Image (tube, grey):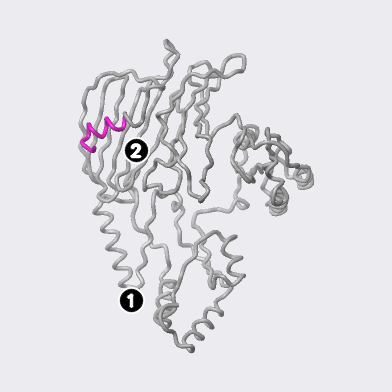
Amino acid sequence: MTGQVEPADAARALSEIDQRREQAIRRKVFPGWWWWAYAVLIVEFAEEDQAENLARLKQLGELMADLGFGWDQPKRRWGGVVEITEPSLQTAIAEFRAAYPDVELTLAEGEPEEIIPRLRAGELDLALLFEFDGQTPLRQTARPVGTVLVIDTSGSMKTRGALDQAKAAAHQFIAGRGPNEWTAIVSFSSAPQVRSNFTQDAAALGAAIDSLQAVGETALWDGLTTAAHLYDQRPDLQPNVVLLSDGADSISSGNEAQATGDLNGDSLPDYAIKLVEDKPEKNSEGDPTERGRALVIALSTKDGKLQRAGVADRLLQCTRCGGAFYGVVESPANVSIEKGIVVVEQDHGSRDLSDTTYRFRYEPTTQRFVLIGFDFSDVDRLTASGVTESTNYLTGIRITTRGKGNRDTKTRSVVQKKIIYLEEAAAEDLEGAALKRLHLD
């Protein structure tokens, strides 16, 4: 409440709120692309005159178009205005505020399983459940659905009844499955173990869950890798993995992420492995910690072993190096293998967002990985103006594009053909040189 509220006004407001308790207003308001957006700005126009609200919304759309954004624009200029709240709900909020000007409305956001219990407990007075357009529930899909329950059985799961809670959650999941769902169970402690492959047999799954005991270390990444490989034999299933764990990895031979592909032309699977520094994800105050990353490339040998072929410890940005654009969210350092090429993509910034892509190819004569391409882009997210630079170190050609909206100009230049091996590749040096060339430093 704000200010002095008359008892009669407070009573009327509380009476109306109580009448609306336990309501669930279901609205189809969010478009299917919502979760693909880079960023979303929610603007509320709360004028009593709905026509005025719509006029302001139109003006906001025109402003975004002037800045170069549109639904037909590529990459980071793709965007526009969408009305996500129905006029009837806007009108209801405006009427309530007019009737009870001294009542402060507050908003809590969360998933239904979090919000509904708070509603029933009286912590919240009204819940709005949003139904997403274009999203088909798993149980209604034509394709069979697969889910691997990956359950932590390390020694730490003995404390505070953690394993019992995980077992209860797993049993609840099994009981609530649909007819098109297949489930597998993988446990991990010092090593992963497949407790049950994909099945619809609830009794067998229940027995596998009940047999779990807590002992040993936490090979979390190995457990997830084992779960992912179960889909190798069931490509017909829509893949899902559910992790039940109380802590971070302590012993895995695995890693934060890895990509697989043939890198040296011998038809054997090779690996580009992204490692993360062995530190807690959060400090004692609950804030994310800064952890370094490294890239390791391993080639498979004919005797089934892996041979290290390259290490880059200055290429991948750290987990907190994304700048204000990512805030407390870990910044990305994406690694993939595309047609025998190791590709590294990462971005960071605030108003100005810098995006870099590095491409490395195996060189048989030296048995090392050499940088063959480097792409850099910088976009001012306020003005939508930007510059991109693409350098091919094999041909010695560099193409620079500057522009705003659809008004782009390209220049082509010849550069020295450099040999930069994976171990020598430093993101700070390569990006710094690009900033200097483009007069952005």
Residue 231 placement: quadrant: top right
Q: Which residues are magenta?
A: 430-441
Instruction: Please state the total of marks drawn on the protein image.
Output: 2
Prevailing secondary structure class for the magenta stretch in the rendered image: helix
**Of the image marks 2 and 1, the number of the one nearer the N terminus:** 1
- Whether residue 185 appears in this view of the structure is no
> Which residue is the site of mark 1?
49
In this rendering, the answer to whether 161 lies above or below 275 is below
Residue 389 x, y percent position in the rendering:
27, 32
In this rendering, the answer to whether 406 lies above or below 83 is above
Residue 423 placement: quadrant: top left
Going by the numbered disc 1, the residue's amino acid type is Asp
Going by the numbered disc 2, the residue's amino acid type is Asp
Q: Is residue 248 magenta?
A: no
How far apart marks 2 and 1 lie (CA) works out to 43 Å
Residue 311 circle label: none
Residue 279 x, y percent position in the rendering:
52, 38
Q: Which residue sits furthest top?
A: 365
Q: Secondary structure at mark 2?
A: strand
Q: Residue at x 48, y 84 (%)?
A: 10
- Whether residue 172 appears in this view of the structure is yes
> Which residue is the site of mark 2?
355
Residue 364 or 192: which is nearer the viewer? Answer: 192
